[in-house]
Image: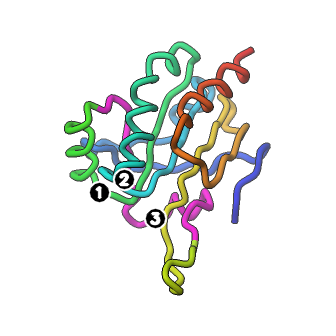
Amino acid sequence: MLLKVGEKAPTFSLPDADMETVDLATFQGKKHIVLFFYPKDGTPCCTKEVTDFSDHEEEFLRHDCVLLGISRDDCLKHAEFRDKEGIGIELLSDTEGTVCKQYGVWQAREVDGHRKFGVSRSTFIIDRSGTIRHALYNVNYKGHAQEVLRLIKELNS
């Protein structure tokens, strides 16, 4: 089930790369949230997307926005990926896929005539009240961080 603009964002708690729990509810009333889901640490497209978001982190922070990246990789894989690529943003581990399913990003696709499930590259912009302002499914990683930053700037104007 895909989430829609205007719905309350499902809350969750997930471990980050340092195995510290990050609770989405702690940001409510304080910051906008960019929650982006990506398939796998270390693959070329995912690396480009995550490092693009990380490279623009200061700009997002200036607009009172926190960045959270989620994949099904475990905390150790996230830590290796973060350290290797110099990523500054929080990478959350959803190994069970519970949050991926809550947000509708765990999707089936046909691969060589077989139905396979995987994480659909998707981004959610959640305002301070916890309401989804943008639900972007199946995004292209190229230029995506800049597009999301533009939407955050509009949200603040």
Instruction: Please report the residue visible at 31 percent of the width from the left and 32 percent of the height from the top.
Output: 87
Secondary structure beneath dot 2 equals strand
Mark positioned earlier in the residue sequence (1 or 3): 1
Report if the CB atoms under discs 1 and 3 are less than 8 Å apart: no
Residue at figure coordinates x 58%, y 23% from the top left: 30
Q: Residue furthest right?
A: 6
Q: Is residue 106 magenta?
A: yes
Task: Give the label on residue 156, or none.
Answer: none
Q: From which residue to which does the magenta span run?
A: 87-107
Report x, y in % for residue 99.
Answer: 51, 58
**SS for dot 3:** loop
Relative to 1, is 94 on the left or the right? left
Q: Which residue is mark 2?
A: 93
Label 1: how many Cα within 10 Å (few below 14, some 14–19, many 20+):
some
Disc 2 from disc 1: Cα separation: 5 Å
Q: Amino acid at mark 1?
A: Asp
Query: What residue is shown at x 41% (from left), y 66% (from top)?
Result: 96
Amino acid type of the residue that numbered disc 2 sits on in the rendered structure: Ser
Q: Amino acid at mark 3?
A: Gly
Helix, strand, or loop for circle 1? loop
Residue marked by disc 3: 97
Residue receiving disc 1: 74
For the N terminus, the quadrant is: bottom right
**Left-right relation of 58 to 120:** left
Q: Is residue 27 above or below residue 122?
A: above
Relative height, residue 34 to residue 94 (above, below)? above
Where does residue 5 sit, x and y in percent of width and height?
77, 45
- x and y, in percent, of residue 38 in the image: 46, 52
Disc with the residue nearer the chain's start (2 vs 1):
1
Q: Quadrant of residue 124?
A: top right
The reply to whether callout 2 and callout 1 are in contact (CB within 8 Å) is yes
